[in-house]
Amino acid sequence: MELKDKSNYALSPYTGYTRENWIELTAKIIAGFMQHANPKTGVLTLTGNPEETRLHRQLKNPGSFVEAFERTHMAVAAYIAATGKTTVDGYPGDIGEIFRKGMATFTDPKNPYAPNYKKGQSFGTGTVIAMLLAPEYFLKPLSKEVRKIWRVSLRI
């Protein structure tokens, strides 16, 4: 993969990658998976076989909508926290908005995508990390009802 910024082995002796390199790589990865995001629900439908990742045995529910959402949410949160931007080249929408929609979708007991919704249930670590890394994007803008549900996961 060709990067705009050159590697710098003096600054990063093991990989040569600088902060800018990592941000650019993350943006490219985000642009890749965002094409699988439903703009109305925030649900990601990733194609392919989860066993190809070699991590499928570590996943609670490989290939599930929740696993896809949780894992990609961490990348989006790290990118937004590092750059303050909610856009990436290669995706025309607001990546933060899509994930806020997903947070609402996964906590709506009437929504078929909501995973075994139970009052007071703790949710996955990916979204909890996202709320901690970028609360101004993934906690404060949520509706009062959705924020209350997710705050249980944060224990605040």
Image (spheres, rainbow, N blue to C red):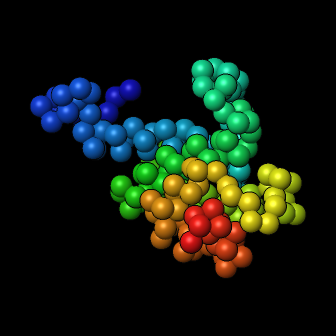
- Asked whether, in this view, residue 24 is left or right of residue 127, the answer is left
Q: Which residue is nearer to you in this view: 35 or 143?
A: 143
- Asked whether, in this view, residue 53 is left or right of residue 18, the answer is right
Quarter of the rendering containing residue 13: top left
Quarter of the rendering containing residue 96: bottom right
Residue 134 in percent (x, y) is at 46, 63
Residue furthest bottom as drawn:
144
Q: Residue at x 24, y 39 (%)?
A: 18
Image quadrant containing the N terminus: top left
32 lies above or below 143: above
68 lies above or below 115: above
Q: Which residue is nearer to you in this view: 123 or 42?
A: 123
Residue 31 in percent (x, y) is at 52, 43
Residue 6 in percent (x, y) is at 22, 33
Quarter of the rendering containing residue 5: top left
Residue 93 in percent (x, y) is at 56, 57
Residue furthest front as drawn:
155
Q: Residue at x 49, y 67 (%)?
A: 135
52 lies above or below 78: above
92 lies above or below 53: below
Q: Residue at x 51, y 55 (%)?
A: 129
Residue 92 in view here: no
Residue 65 in view here: yes
Counting labels gives 0
Q: Residue at x 28, y 44 (%)?
A: 20
Image quadrant containing the C terminus: bottom right
